[in-house]
Image (spheres, rainbow, N blue to C red):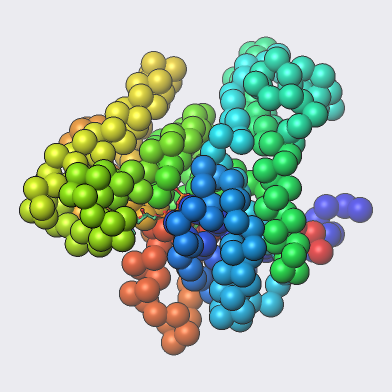
Amino acid sequence: MLSFLSKQKLTIGLDIGSHSIKICELAEVGKKMKLVSLGTAQLPAGVVEDGELKDAEAVAEIIKKLIKNLGIKSRKVAISISGYSVIMKKINLAVMTDDELQHHIQAEAEQYIPFDIDEVYIDYQDLQTNEEGEERTDVMLVAAKKDVVNTYIDMLNSIGLNVVVVDVDAFALENSYELSMGQEGNVILVDIGSSKMNINIISEGASVFARDVFLGSRQLTEQIQSRLGISFEEAEDLKICAQDPGGQVGGLEETFASACTQWVLEIKKALDFYASNYPDAPIDRMVLSGGGVHIRGLSEFFSAEANLDVDVFNPFVATTFDAKKIDRDYVAYLGPEMAISTGLATRKVPF
Ligand SMILES: Nc1ncnc2c1ncn2[C@@H]1O[C@H](COP(=O)(O)OP(=O)(O)OP(=O)(O)O)[C@@H](O)[C@H]1O
Ligand SMILES: [Mg+2]
């Protein structure tokens, strides 16, 4: 069938984080996207860890309730994975036809990834970095462990949801950015979640560097907890109430500064790598998302350390919504955390 004749439908974006579930539903209205529903539900500690499902039943129950509360009817969901079970790698190959490339990846993937080839799902995209007449191009290769992906699929099937797209966090973030900002500029996208940060550098409309780092906002809570000898919940409350990274709460300035410094070091590593490989296309700005953005003063700290303009990401700037049904302040507050789920909600599948 000719592809322009096949009907396409948007999926429900479902981001299963280690701190909370986020769901986003979009609809196409003319040339614009409309936000139909969004919501989050916090997860008990430990049910999702390091990008893996530890307690599938508990997570399934929470997702089921959230979908019901939001009144979502579609059963087709797009999910993303990240963490130790995913490898994203840019490889440089001779320019090939689509068929040749598929063949090459199937035959040679083993040499690029540290997993047993039978145990992973593989996907790739030719980044078409070759200029006219050049013979080599960059290809982004992604491998994800089948057993980890399958636990998510099985868990969602158990509550009647059909997983139609499995993406990775960093690329969902990129789709989210494109939805709101188009392809303008060279940017570094940074999502600071609870247990990890995703870094994705977009240069001239394509992702040229994508990496997950296993540092996140939970680390800060744990450091506060051990420093003050209090419970995780008390430490979490203190973190959320603190005024800024150099804040006044309980002498925690150093704790904030040390966590934020570790994060910015990872960002600088990515920026250095990029600067040496793409010296002619400097980064214009950093775009921050994830629950970590709520740490007061974080943008300013990153901006000063990385010497870049930093924006807090709002994935809904180019999206309409019915302000009678969805509260404007809620959308604005939740925007940064919804970045990945929104990117997932832009994915289309035939129906
Ligand atoms: N107002 C706030 N001030 C400070 N931190 C906050 C605030 N709100 C949320 N956070 C922190 O943000 C983190 C949750 O962010 P997010 O929802 O992006 O994580 P996640 O997607 O569930 O986790 P991950 O992607 O790492 O698996 C938690 O550590 C939480 O403490
Ligand atoms: Mg997350």
Q: Position of residue 98 (x, y in %)?
A: 79, 29
Q: Is residue 89 above or below residue 337?
A: above
Q: Residue furthest right?
A: 1
Give the camera-side residue of 207 and 300. 300
The image quadrant of residue 332 is: bottom left
Q: Position of residue 278 (x, y in %)?
A: 43, 20
* Res. 96 in view: no
Please state, as top left, top right, bottom left or bottom right, where the C terminus lies in the image. bottom right
Q: Is residue 279 above or below residue 1?
A: above
Question: Position of 40 compared to 157: left or right?
Answer: left
Q: Residue furthest bottom?
A: 324
Q: Residue at x 60, y 51 (%)?
A: 53
Q: Position of residue 74 (x, y in %)?
A: 70, 72
Give the camera-side residue of 293 and 50. 50
Q: Residue at x 73, y 19 (%)?
A: 110
Question: Position of 114 compared to 199: left or right?
Answer: right
Q: Residue at x 56, y 34 (%)?
A: 84
Q: Residue at x 76, y 25 (%)?
A: 117
Q: Is residue 23 above or below residue 278?
A: below
